Image (spheres, rainbow, N blue to C red):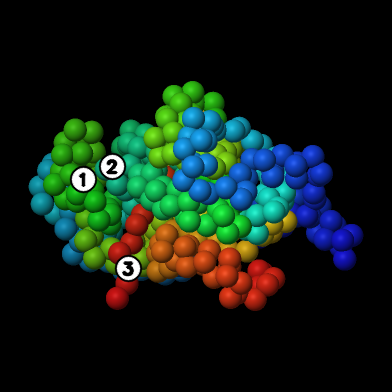
Amino acid sequence: MRLSFTVLSPSLVAAGLVLAGFPGGSAADDRASTGTIKLESLKWSQFKERLASSKPAKFTLVDVWATTCGPCKENFPHLVEMHRKYAGKGLAVISLTLDDPTDAKAVAEAEEFLREKKAVFTNVLLDENYGDGFDKLDINTIPAVFIFSADGKEMKRFTMDDPNHQFTYEQVEKEVVALLEGTQPKGFAK
Amino acid sequence: MRKILLGLAVVALAVPVFADHFNKIVKVGDKAPDFSGIPAVSPSGEQSSLTLSDLKEDVVVLVFLANHCPVVQACDDRIIDFANDYKDKSVKLVAVSVNDINQDRLPGIKSHMKEKKLNYTYGYDESQAIGRAYGATNTPHFFVLDKERKIRYIGAMDDNAMHESKVTKHYLRDAVDALLAGKTPQVEETRAAGCSVKYKKSK
């Protein structure tokens, strides 16, 4: 099942504007906000609301990771880089960790990692039972990357779930560029 | 249009968001993909190999593992217990790693076996062919094969890979018990929880 989110709340839209940091992305902005990197705990429903209120960003890139996931951490700089390059062009970026929210050590480690990587975008800790995030997102494993439209509709998913079609961050970036340049027909999502 | 969309959103929330089919390559009922001559280490530490047709037990449990993976490490003792509890019931558990990571290759398997006193044969398939054939995406990832060597269960060992004390559902044991009793497992596929298996790009 693909996720479809249509409910918008005006106050959340406003919150989304601030938190998405749009249209930031300049080096100066990054430096200014490095000190304020934080990890927000959100329920799944709150996360979906956040996704549905990302305007004026055109798209939201969501990277799903966890501190226990080596390949996720290895590839995290790609996300930081994409934010740096495309935030000013309309890309909102969210990191979503599936670490156990009741495991204080893991949460502290996640925060430390985000600061170390200068993750100057929205960082979310999924506040649900450990493991439920996989069902909510309908993925078998991480890393996984999603692109959502400004109203929170899933447009594209990149996963490791098919041994013969595992994604690379190069593919993600290509898609991001194509979407931002509008070379993909609008509304091609399933 | 708006109303229709909202209606759909409500339906979407009312239905579980997961399908009961997770594996992209094989499904329950399929003939188990064959494998042979996979270099392996036996529990005694000797050089061995894994060949499906060599296994004569009624039930074969094939599990994909990775020494480096914290989730596998959390499950090690449970897998040992399982192999031990079922060894006299004509159930054979064999493990294989396909990861292109130093620690997950044969020398790593040897030392992991010694350190944890693993009681099952554990192989390493550098070609990753066995992993692709089974659609193994996680470690640990379990596949239960019946006497006809059809796949009868795919997925996780239980419902909490990281914390044994929080386990409430024993999917693997339940599936194997059902097969031994000549029944169809009640739960035939679950989402495997664990580290991802990275495949080399196919040529």
Mark 2, mark 3: which one is toward the viewer? 3
Q: Nearer the viewer, residue A166 or B81?
A: A166
Q: Whole-percent x and y of residue B95?
A: 29, 50
Q: Which residue is mark 3?
A: B201
Q: Which label number is shown at residue B103?
A: 1
State the residue at coordinates (84%, 56%): B6
- Badge 3, how many Cα within 10 Å: few under 14, some, many 20+? few
Q: Are marks 2 and 3 on the same chain?
A: yes
Q: What SS does tag 3 mark?
A: loop
Q: Nearer the viewer, residue B124 or B57?
A: B124
Residue lying farthest top? A104
Which quadrant, please, contains the N terminus of chain B?
bottom right
Q: Whole-percent x and y of residue A190?
A: 66, 69
Q: Which label number is shown at residue B68?
A: 2
Q: What SS does tag 2 mark?
A: loop
Q: Are marks 2 and 1 in contact (CB under 8 Å)?
A: yes
Tell me the subunit letter for badge 1.
B
Under mark 1, the amino acid is Gln
Tell me the subunit letter for badge 3.
B
Q: Whole-percent x and y of residue A76?
A: 41, 47
Tell me if residue A19 can be seen. yes
Is A146 displayed left or right of A118 in the figure? right
Under mark 2, the amino acid is His
Q: Nearer the viewer, residue B14 or A124?
A: A124
Q: Is residue A36 above or below residue A152?
A: above
Under mark 3, the amino acid is Lys
- Badge 1, how many Cα within 10 Å: few under 14, some, many 20+? some
Counting labels gives 3
State the residue at coordinates (82%, 61%): B5
